[in-house]
Amino acid sequence: MDRNGERRFVKAVGACLVCAAVLAITACGKKGNNNILHVEDAEAERAVNMFSPMEKTEADTVNTARSAVDKTVIMAEEKLGIKVSYVTYTAEDYQDKTYDEVALDRARNNMDDLYLLNPDTIRILGEEGKLADLSELASVENLRDMVKAANVVDGKLVAIPQEVVVYGLFINKDMFDRYELELPNTPEEFLECCRVLKENGVETPVGANRWWLETFVLAQAYADLYNGGNTGAEIEALNSGESKYSDYMRPGFEFLQEMIDKGYIDAGKAYVSEAIEGEGADFLAQKTPIVMAYWGAANTDTAYGNPDFKMVVIGFPTDRGQMPVMPMTGLGVGTDAEHKEDALQALEAMTSDEALKVYAETNKVISPSKNVEVECIPALKPLNDRIQENVYVLGANASMNMEQWGNTCQVVRMLLNGATVDECMAEFDRLQEESNRSVK
Protein backbone atom coordinates (compact mmCIF):
# COMPACT_ATOMS: atom_id res chain seq x y z
CA MET A 1 0.00 0.00 0.00
CA ASP A 2 1.75 3.20 -1.06
CA ARG A 3 1.21 6.44 0.77
CA ASN A 4 -0.76 7.91 -2.13
CA GLY A 5 -2.92 4.80 -2.22
CA GLU A 6 -6.52 4.49 -1.29
CA ARG A 7 -7.70 5.59 2.16
CA ARG A 8 -11.15 4.13 2.43
CA PHE A 9 -13.52 5.41 5.06
CA VAL A 10 -16.83 3.92 6.06
CA LYS A 11 -20.27 5.31 5.36
CA ALA A 12 -21.34 7.88 7.93
CA VAL A 13 -23.89 6.64 10.44
CA GLY A 14 -26.78 9.02 11.10
CA ALA A 15 -26.13 12.71 11.63
CA CYS A 16 -22.39 12.59 12.29
CA LEU A 17 -20.50 15.79 12.93
CA VAL A 18 -19.19 17.08 9.66
CA CYS A 19 -15.50 16.90 10.62
CA ALA A 20 -15.94 13.54 12.30
CA ALA A 21 -17.95 12.51 9.27
CA VAL A 22 -14.97 13.12 6.99
CA LEU A 23 -12.93 10.75 9.14
CA ALA A 24 -15.79 8.28 9.39
CA ILE A 25 -17.02 8.45 5.82
CA THR A 26 -14.07 8.71 3.59
CA ALA A 27 -10.80 7.03 4.48
CA CYS A 28 -10.37 3.27 5.02
CA GLY A 29 -13.89 2.75 3.57
CA LYS A 30 -15.63 0.54 1.08
CA LYS A 31 -16.39 0.76 -2.60
CA GLY A 32 -19.82 0.44 -4.11
CA ASN A 33 -21.85 1.47 -7.10
CA ASN A 34 -22.30 5.19 -7.75
CA ASN A 35 -20.93 8.42 -6.36
CA ILE A 36 -23.11 11.45 -6.86
CA LEU A 37 -21.42 14.82 -7.17
CA HIS A 38 -23.78 17.71 -6.49
CA VAL A 39 -23.00 21.30 -7.44
CA GLU A 40 -25.12 24.09 -6.02
CA ASP A 41 -24.62 26.96 -8.41
CA ALA A 42 -24.29 30.48 -7.11
CA GLU A 43 -25.35 33.50 -9.14
CA ALA A 44 -23.07 36.05 -7.52
CA GLU A 45 -20.36 38.46 -8.58
CA ARG A 46 -18.07 37.13 -5.84
CA ALA A 47 -18.35 33.37 -5.42
CA VAL A 48 -16.41 30.68 -3.57
CA ASN A 49 -16.78 26.99 -4.42
CA MET A 50 -16.46 24.64 -1.41
CA PHE A 51 -16.01 20.88 -1.77
CA SER A 52 -17.38 18.90 1.17
CA PRO A 53 -18.77 15.43 2.00
CA MET A 54 -22.41 16.38 2.57
CA GLU A 55 -25.06 18.53 0.95
CA LYS A 56 -26.21 21.88 2.21
CA THR A 57 -28.96 21.59 4.80
CA GLU A 58 -32.48 21.81 3.44
CA ALA A 59 -35.19 23.55 5.46
CA ASP A 60 -36.88 20.26 6.39
CA THR A 61 -33.71 18.28 7.08
CA VAL A 62 -32.45 17.52 10.58
CA ASN A 63 -28.68 17.47 10.31
CA THR A 64 -27.00 19.19 13.23
CA ALA A 65 -23.51 18.87 11.87
CA ARG A 66 -24.30 20.47 8.57
CA SER A 67 -26.37 23.16 10.24
CA ALA A 68 -23.28 24.21 12.20
CA VAL A 69 -21.23 24.52 9.02
CA ASP A 70 -24.04 26.36 7.29
CA LYS A 71 -24.22 28.89 10.10
CA THR A 72 -20.54 29.76 9.74
CA VAL A 73 -20.83 29.91 5.95
CA ILE A 74 -23.75 32.31 6.24
CA MET A 75 -21.71 34.46 8.63
CA ALA A 76 -18.90 34.63 6.06
CA GLU A 77 -21.32 35.41 3.23
CA GLU A 78 -22.96 38.23 5.14
CA LYS A 79 -19.67 39.71 6.32
CA LEU A 80 -17.92 39.60 2.94
CA GLY A 81 -20.80 39.97 0.49
CA ILE A 82 -19.94 36.71 -1.25
CA LYS A 83 -21.81 33.51 -2.11
CA VAL A 84 -20.40 30.11 -1.12
CA SER A 85 -21.44 27.34 -3.51
CA TYR A 86 -21.37 23.74 -2.25
CA VAL A 87 -19.77 21.13 -4.50
CA THR A 88 -20.79 17.93 -2.80
CA TYR A 89 -19.78 14.29 -2.76
CA THR A 90 -22.56 12.13 -1.39
CA ALA A 91 -22.65 8.40 -0.74
CA GLU A 92 -26.28 7.67 -1.52
CA ASP A 93 -24.88 5.11 -3.91
CA TYR A 94 -21.26 3.99 -4.13
CA GLN A 95 -18.86 3.91 -7.00
CA ASP A 96 -15.17 3.18 -7.39
CA LYS A 97 -13.93 6.55 -6.15
CA THR A 98 -13.85 7.47 -2.47
CA TYR A 99 -14.27 11.00 -1.11
CA ASP A 100 -10.48 11.27 -0.69
CA GLU A 101 -9.83 10.28 -4.29
CA VAL A 102 -12.35 12.78 -5.58
CA ALA A 103 -10.94 15.52 -3.31
CA LEU A 104 -7.39 14.84 -4.50
CA ASP A 105 -8.44 14.96 -8.14
CA ARG A 106 -10.42 18.18 -7.74
CA ALA A 107 -7.69 19.95 -5.76
CA ARG A 108 -4.94 18.89 -8.17
CA ASN A 109 -6.95 20.28 -11.05
CA ASN A 110 -7.99 23.52 -9.28
CA MET A 111 -11.67 22.68 -9.64
CA ASP A 112 -12.77 24.32 -6.36
CA ASP A 113 -11.57 27.02 -4.00
CA LEU A 114 -12.15 25.63 -0.50
CA TYR A 115 -11.89 21.96 0.53
CA LEU A 116 -12.82 19.96 3.63
CA LEU A 117 -10.08 17.34 3.86
CA ASN A 118 -8.93 14.26 5.77
CA PRO A 119 -5.50 14.18 7.48
CA ASP A 120 -3.77 12.03 4.86
CA THR A 121 -5.21 14.12 2.02
CA ILE A 122 -4.02 17.30 3.73
CA ARG A 123 -0.55 15.78 3.89
CA ILE A 124 -0.48 14.73 0.24
CA LEU A 125 -1.80 18.01 -1.14
CA GLY A 126 0.43 20.02 1.18
CA GLU A 127 3.54 18.22 -0.03
CA GLU A 128 2.46 18.73 -3.64
CA GLY A 129 2.11 22.46 -3.03
CA LYS A 130 -1.60 22.39 -3.85
CA LEU A 131 -2.76 24.06 -0.62
CA ALA A 132 -2.22 27.74 0.22
CA ASP A 133 -0.31 28.84 3.32
CA LEU A 134 -2.88 30.00 5.89
CA SER A 135 -0.38 31.29 8.45
CA GLU A 136 -1.27 34.94 7.90
CA LEU A 137 -5.01 34.57 8.53
CA ALA A 138 -6.08 36.53 11.61
CA SER A 139 -7.90 33.50 13.03
CA VAL A 140 -4.65 31.50 13.23
CA GLU A 141 -3.49 33.51 16.24
CA ASN A 142 -6.30 31.97 18.33
CA LEU A 143 -5.75 28.33 17.36
CA ARG A 144 -4.66 25.76 19.91
CA ASP A 145 -1.05 24.66 19.46
CA MET A 146 -2.07 21.05 18.79
CA VAL A 147 -4.28 22.19 15.88
CA LYS A 148 -1.46 24.08 14.23
CA ALA A 149 1.05 21.28 14.83
CA ALA A 150 -1.21 18.71 13.17
CA ASN A 151 -1.68 20.71 9.96
CA VAL A 152 1.77 22.14 9.18
CA VAL A 153 3.39 20.69 6.05
CA ASP A 154 6.85 21.83 4.95
CA GLY A 155 6.67 24.73 7.38
CA LYS A 156 3.28 25.96 6.11
CA LEU A 157 -0.08 25.81 7.86
CA VAL A 158 -2.25 24.34 5.10
CA ALA A 159 -5.55 23.50 6.86
CA ILE A 160 -7.73 24.71 9.75
CA PRO A 161 -10.55 22.64 11.30
CA GLN A 162 -13.81 23.93 12.72
CA GLU A 163 -13.75 21.37 15.52
CA VAL A 164 -11.28 19.11 17.28
CA VAL A 165 -12.35 15.51 16.64
CA VAL A 166 -11.67 13.40 19.74
CA TYR A 167 -11.95 9.63 20.13
CA GLY A 168 -12.48 7.85 23.43
CA LEU A 169 -13.83 4.72 25.09
CA PHE A 170 -17.57 4.70 25.72
CA ILE A 171 -18.23 2.76 28.94
CA ASN A 172 -21.46 1.32 30.34
CA LYS A 173 -20.88 2.57 33.89
CA ASP A 174 -23.84 0.60 35.26
CA MET A 175 -22.24 -2.68 34.17
CA PHE A 176 -18.87 -1.62 35.59
CA ASP A 177 -20.53 -0.79 38.91
CA ARG A 178 -22.38 -4.11 38.91
CA TYR A 179 -19.05 -5.95 38.90
CA GLU A 180 -17.30 -3.40 41.14
CA LEU A 181 -14.90 -2.31 38.42
CA GLU A 182 -12.98 0.97 38.47
CA LEU A 183 -12.50 2.88 35.23
CA PRO A 184 -9.16 1.66 33.80
CA ASN A 185 -6.14 3.92 33.41
CA THR A 186 -3.46 1.51 32.16
CA PRO A 187 -3.45 -1.38 29.67
CA GLU A 188 -3.10 -3.83 32.56
CA GLU A 189 -6.12 -2.39 34.35
CA PHE A 190 -8.13 -2.49 31.12
CA LEU A 191 -7.31 -6.16 30.54
CA GLU A 192 -8.29 -6.96 34.14
CA CYS A 193 -11.67 -5.29 33.59
CA CYS A 194 -12.16 -7.42 30.49
CA ARG A 195 -11.22 -10.57 32.41
CA VAL A 196 -13.78 -9.87 35.12
CA LEU A 197 -16.49 -9.05 32.60
CA LYS A 198 -15.75 -12.20 30.60
CA GLU A 199 -15.82 -14.39 33.71
CA ASN A 200 -19.20 -12.91 34.64
CA GLY A 201 -20.82 -13.95 31.40
CA VAL A 202 -20.12 -11.00 29.10
CA GLU A 203 -19.32 -12.82 25.87
CA THR A 204 -17.47 -9.95 24.18
CA PRO A 205 -16.45 -7.15 26.58
CA VAL A 206 -15.24 -4.81 23.81
CA GLY A 207 -17.37 -4.04 20.75
CA ALA A 208 -15.15 -3.27 17.78
CA ASN A 209 -15.32 -2.43 14.09
CA ARG A 210 -12.78 -2.57 11.33
CA TRP A 211 -11.80 1.09 11.45
CA TRP A 212 -11.36 2.39 15.00
CA LEU A 213 -9.21 -0.17 16.83
CA GLU A 214 -6.18 1.88 15.79
CA THR A 215 -7.14 4.31 18.55
CA PHE A 216 -5.85 1.83 21.16
CA VAL A 217 -2.59 1.50 19.24
CA LEU A 218 -2.02 5.21 18.64
CA ALA A 219 -2.71 6.06 22.29
CA GLN A 220 -0.14 3.59 23.57
CA ALA A 221 2.35 4.31 20.79
CA TYR A 222 2.49 8.08 21.24
CA ALA A 223 1.53 8.77 24.87
CA ASP A 224 5.15 9.59 25.69
CA LEU A 225 5.95 11.25 22.36
CA TYR A 226 3.22 13.88 22.78
CA ASN A 227 3.37 14.24 26.55
CA GLY A 228 7.03 13.68 27.41
CA GLY A 229 8.40 17.09 26.45
CA ASN A 230 10.49 15.88 23.49
CA THR A 231 7.96 15.75 20.67
CA GLY A 232 9.94 17.58 17.98
CA ALA A 233 13.12 15.56 18.46
CA GLU A 234 11.26 12.25 18.45
CA ILE A 235 9.41 13.09 15.25
CA GLU A 236 12.68 14.20 13.63
CA ALA A 237 14.22 10.84 14.55
CA LEU A 238 11.28 9.01 12.98
CA ASN A 239 11.50 11.11 9.82
CA SER A 240 15.23 10.47 9.49
CA GLY A 241 14.85 6.73 10.11
CA GLU A 242 16.95 6.88 13.26
CA SER A 243 13.89 5.63 15.19
CA LYS A 244 11.36 3.07 14.00
CA TYR A 245 7.59 3.44 14.05
CA SER A 246 7.42 -0.29 14.66
CA ASP A 247 9.10 0.17 18.05
CA TYR A 248 6.39 2.66 18.99
CA MET A 249 3.57 0.52 17.59
CA ARG A 250 4.54 -2.90 18.93
CA PRO A 251 3.10 -2.55 22.48
CA GLY A 252 -0.31 -1.53 21.13
CA PHE A 253 -0.39 -4.40 18.66
CA GLU A 254 0.64 -6.90 21.32
CA PHE A 255 -2.18 -5.48 23.48
CA LEU A 256 -4.71 -5.99 20.66
CA GLN A 257 -3.41 -9.50 20.02
CA GLU A 258 -3.90 -10.38 23.69
CA MET A 259 -7.48 -9.09 23.53
CA ILE A 260 -8.10 -11.21 20.43
CA ASP A 261 -6.52 -14.32 21.96
CA LYS A 262 -8.59 -14.02 25.14
CA GLY A 263 -11.85 -13.34 23.33
CA TYR A 264 -12.23 -9.81 24.65
CA ILE A 265 -12.88 -8.66 21.08
CA ASP A 266 -14.26 -10.70 18.19
CA ALA A 267 -11.64 -10.22 15.47
CA GLY A 268 -13.72 -11.93 12.78
CA LYS A 269 -16.73 -9.74 13.40
CA ALA A 270 -14.62 -6.59 13.78
CA TYR A 271 -12.89 -7.23 10.46
CA VAL A 272 -16.16 -7.00 8.52
CA SER A 273 -18.13 -4.54 10.69
CA GLU A 274 -18.76 -0.91 9.87
CA ALA A 275 -18.32 1.80 12.49
CA ILE A 276 -21.16 1.90 15.03
CA GLU A 277 -23.31 -0.28 12.77
CA GLY A 278 -21.31 -3.34 13.84
CA GLU A 279 -21.13 -2.84 17.60
CA GLY A 280 -23.66 -0.13 18.41
CA ALA A 281 -26.72 -2.32 18.86
CA ASP A 282 -24.99 -4.62 21.38
CA PHE A 283 -23.68 -1.63 23.33
CA LEU A 284 -27.11 -0.02 23.56
CA ALA A 285 -28.66 -3.40 24.46
CA GLN A 286 -26.11 -3.69 27.31
CA LYS A 287 -24.58 -6.85 25.89
CA THR A 288 -21.22 -5.18 25.28
CA PRO A 289 -20.04 -2.67 27.92
CA ILE A 290 -17.16 -1.02 26.01
CA VAL A 291 -16.97 0.55 22.54
CA MET A 292 -14.81 3.22 20.94
CA ALA A 293 -16.22 6.26 19.14
CA TYR A 294 -15.74 9.96 18.53
CA TRP A 295 -16.89 12.79 20.83
CA GLY A 296 -19.94 13.69 18.76
CA ALA A 297 -21.42 10.20 19.07
CA ALA A 298 -22.21 11.00 22.72
CA ASN A 299 -24.33 13.96 21.58
CA THR A 300 -26.08 12.21 18.71
CA ASP A 301 -29.31 10.27 19.25
CA THR A 302 -28.59 8.19 16.16
CA ALA A 303 -25.38 6.97 17.83
CA TYR A 304 -24.91 6.83 21.63
CA GLY A 305 -26.53 10.08 22.72
CA ASN A 306 -29.53 8.61 24.54
CA PRO A 307 -28.68 5.27 26.20
CA ASP A 308 -30.85 3.53 28.81
CA PHE A 309 -27.94 3.35 31.22
CA LYS A 310 -25.30 5.59 32.74
CA MET A 311 -22.56 6.13 30.18
CA VAL A 312 -19.13 7.68 30.64
CA VAL A 313 -16.46 8.43 28.02
CA ILE A 314 -12.78 8.10 28.94
CA GLY A 315 -9.42 8.11 27.19
CA PHE A 316 -7.66 4.98 25.98
CA PRO A 317 -5.48 3.08 28.48
CA THR A 318 -1.76 3.94 28.48
CA ASP A 319 1.12 3.99 30.95
CA ARG A 320 0.39 7.72 31.31
CA GLY A 321 -3.26 7.09 32.13
CA GLN A 322 -6.40 7.69 30.10
CA MET A 323 -5.47 9.20 26.72
CA PRO A 324 -7.74 10.99 24.22
CA VAL A 325 -6.85 10.43 20.56
CA MET A 326 -7.35 13.30 18.10
CA PRO A 327 -7.16 12.88 14.32
CA MET A 328 -7.39 16.29 12.64
CA THR A 329 -9.44 17.15 9.58
CA GLY A 330 -9.28 20.63 8.12
CA LEU A 331 -10.43 23.22 5.61
CA GLY A 332 -7.85 24.19 3.02
CA VAL A 333 -7.67 26.66 0.11
CA GLY A 334 -6.24 25.72 -3.27
CA THR A 335 -2.93 27.41 -4.07
CA ASP A 336 -4.11 28.22 -7.61
CA ALA A 337 -7.83 28.48 -6.84
CA GLU A 338 -9.81 30.69 -9.18
CA HIS A 339 -11.27 32.66 -6.27
CA LYS A 340 -8.31 32.27 -3.92
CA GLU A 341 -8.46 35.63 -2.15
CA ASP A 342 -12.20 35.40 -1.52
CA ALA A 343 -11.74 31.80 -0.33
CA LEU A 344 -9.04 32.89 2.13
CA GLN A 345 -11.28 35.63 3.48
CA ALA A 346 -14.20 33.20 3.73
CA LEU A 347 -12.08 30.70 5.66
CA GLU A 348 -10.83 33.44 7.96
CA ALA A 349 -14.44 34.40 8.72
CA MET A 350 -15.54 30.77 9.17
CA THR A 351 -12.71 30.12 11.65
CA SER A 352 -12.98 33.38 13.58
CA ASP A 353 -13.73 33.07 17.31
CA GLU A 354 -17.24 34.37 16.64
CA ALA A 355 -17.97 31.69 14.04
CA LEU A 356 -16.25 28.89 15.97
CA LYS A 357 -18.29 29.73 19.05
CA VAL A 358 -21.49 29.32 17.00
CA TYR A 359 -20.18 26.04 15.59
CA ALA A 360 -19.12 24.66 18.97
CA GLU A 361 -22.38 25.63 20.68
CA THR A 362 -24.41 24.05 17.88
CA ASN A 363 -22.52 20.75 17.89
CA LYS A 364 -21.36 20.76 21.55
CA VAL A 365 -17.80 19.97 20.51
CA ILE A 366 -14.27 21.08 21.36
CA SER A 367 -13.24 24.14 19.41
CA PRO A 368 -9.87 24.55 17.69
CA SER A 369 -9.75 28.05 19.20
CA LYS A 370 -8.19 28.37 22.64
CA ASN A 371 -10.67 31.20 23.32
CA VAL A 372 -13.84 29.14 22.77
CA GLU A 373 -15.11 26.81 25.49
CA VAL A 374 -18.40 24.94 25.48
CA GLU A 375 -19.81 23.05 28.43
CA CYS A 376 -19.89 19.35 27.64
CA ILE A 377 -22.47 16.79 28.73
CA PRO A 378 -21.61 14.92 31.99
CA ALA A 379 -20.73 11.69 30.16
CA LEU A 380 -17.88 13.44 28.33
CA LYS A 381 -16.37 15.13 31.38
CA PRO A 382 -13.56 12.56 32.03
CA LEU A 383 -12.42 12.82 28.41
CA ASN A 384 -12.71 16.60 28.42
CA ASP A 385 -10.77 16.90 31.67
CA ARG A 386 -7.75 15.24 30.09
CA ILE A 387 -7.93 17.53 27.07
CA GLN A 388 -8.12 20.59 29.29
CA GLU A 389 -4.99 19.30 31.03
CA ASN A 390 -3.32 19.24 27.56
CA VAL A 391 -2.98 15.47 27.76
CA TYR A 392 -3.71 13.82 24.40
CA VAL A 393 -2.28 11.99 21.43
CA LEU A 394 -2.62 13.22 17.84
CA GLY A 395 -4.01 10.56 15.52
CA ALA A 396 -2.67 12.49 12.54
CA ASN A 397 0.31 14.80 12.27
CA ALA A 398 1.37 16.39 9.01
CA SER A 399 4.92 16.88 10.31
CA MET A 400 5.44 13.10 10.28
CA ASN A 401 6.62 11.72 6.95
CA MET A 402 4.50 8.60 7.39
CA GLU A 403 0.75 9.17 7.45
CA GLN A 404 -0.64 7.82 10.72
CA TRP A 405 -4.43 7.37 10.82
CA GLY A 406 -5.03 5.54 7.54
CA ASN A 407 -1.86 3.44 7.62
CA THR A 408 -2.39 2.29 11.20
CA CYS A 409 -6.00 1.45 10.36
CA GLN A 410 -4.86 -0.75 7.50
CA VAL A 411 -2.17 -2.55 9.50
CA VAL A 412 -4.63 -3.22 12.34
CA ARG A 413 -6.90 -4.82 9.74
CA MET A 414 -4.00 -7.11 8.83
CA LEU A 415 -3.88 -8.21 12.48
CA LEU A 416 -7.64 -8.79 12.55
CA ASN A 417 -7.28 -10.94 9.43
CA GLY A 418 -4.69 -13.23 11.03
CA ALA A 419 -1.32 -11.54 10.47
CA THR A 420 1.19 -11.85 13.30
CA VAL A 421 2.43 -8.89 15.29
CA ASP A 422 5.87 -9.33 13.68
CA GLU A 423 4.32 -9.23 10.21
CA CYS A 424 2.48 -6.04 11.14
CA MET A 425 5.70 -4.47 12.39
CA ALA A 426 7.46 -5.41 9.16
CA GLU A 427 4.70 -3.57 7.29
CA PHE A 428 5.31 -0.45 9.39
CA ASP A 429 9.04 -0.69 8.61
CA ARG A 430 8.22 -0.88 4.90
CA LEU A 431 5.82 2.06 5.09
CA GLN A 432 8.35 4.15 7.02
CA GLU A 433 11.15 3.45 4.56
CA GLU A 434 8.88 4.26 1.63
CA SER A 435 7.56 7.45 3.22
CA ASN A 436 10.95 8.77 4.27
CA ARG A 437 12.42 8.03 0.85
CA SER A 438 9.61 9.87 -0.91
CA VAL A 439 10.33 13.18 0.85
CA LYS A 440 14.09 13.20 0.39
Image (cartoon, rainbow, N blue to C red):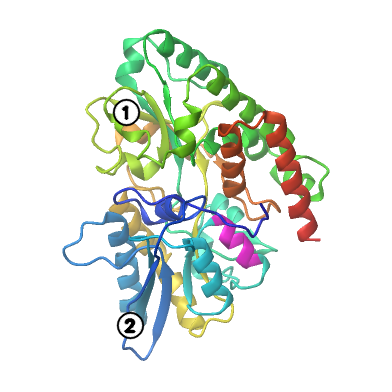
Give above or below for 266 relative to 85.
above
| Disc on res. 17 | none
Residue on which disc 2 sits: 41
Q: Which mark is residue 282?
A: 1
Q: Is residue 365 left or right of residue 389?
A: left
Magenta stretch, main secondary structure, is helix
Residue 194 to residue 338: above or below:
above
Circle 2 crowding by C-alpha within 10 Å: few under 14, some 14–19, many from 20:
few
Percent of width and height locating residue 277: 35, 40
Q: Circle 1 — which element?
A: helix
Q: Is residue 125 magenta?
A: yes
Q: Residue type at mark 1?
A: Asp
- Mark 2 vs mark 1, foreground winner is 1
Residue at point 30%, 37% (across, down): 304
Mark 2 to mark 1 CA distance (whole Å): 43 Å
In the shown orientation, is residue 164 left or right of residue 394?
Answer: left
Q: Nearer the viewer, residue 296 or 105?
A: 105
Q: Is residue 33 left or right of residue 407?
A: left
Looking at the image, which residue is at 40% across and 31% down?
A: 291
In this orientation, which residue lies closer to the viewer: 215 or 28? 28
Q: Where does the magenta region start and end?
A: 119-126
Q: Is residue 344 visible?
A: yes
Say which element carries label 2: loop
Looking at marks 2 and 1 on the same chain, the residue that comes earlier in the sequence is marked by 2
| Quarter of the C terminus within the rendering | bottom right
Residue type, label 2: Asp
**Residue 306 image point, x, y percent:** 23, 36
> Callout 1 environment at 10 Å: few (<14), some (14 to 19), or many (20+)?
some
- Residue 307: in magenta span: no
Tally the marks. Answer: 2
Query: Residue 54 appears at what percent x and percent y?
Result: 35, 63
Residue 70 position in % (x across, y down): 30, 66
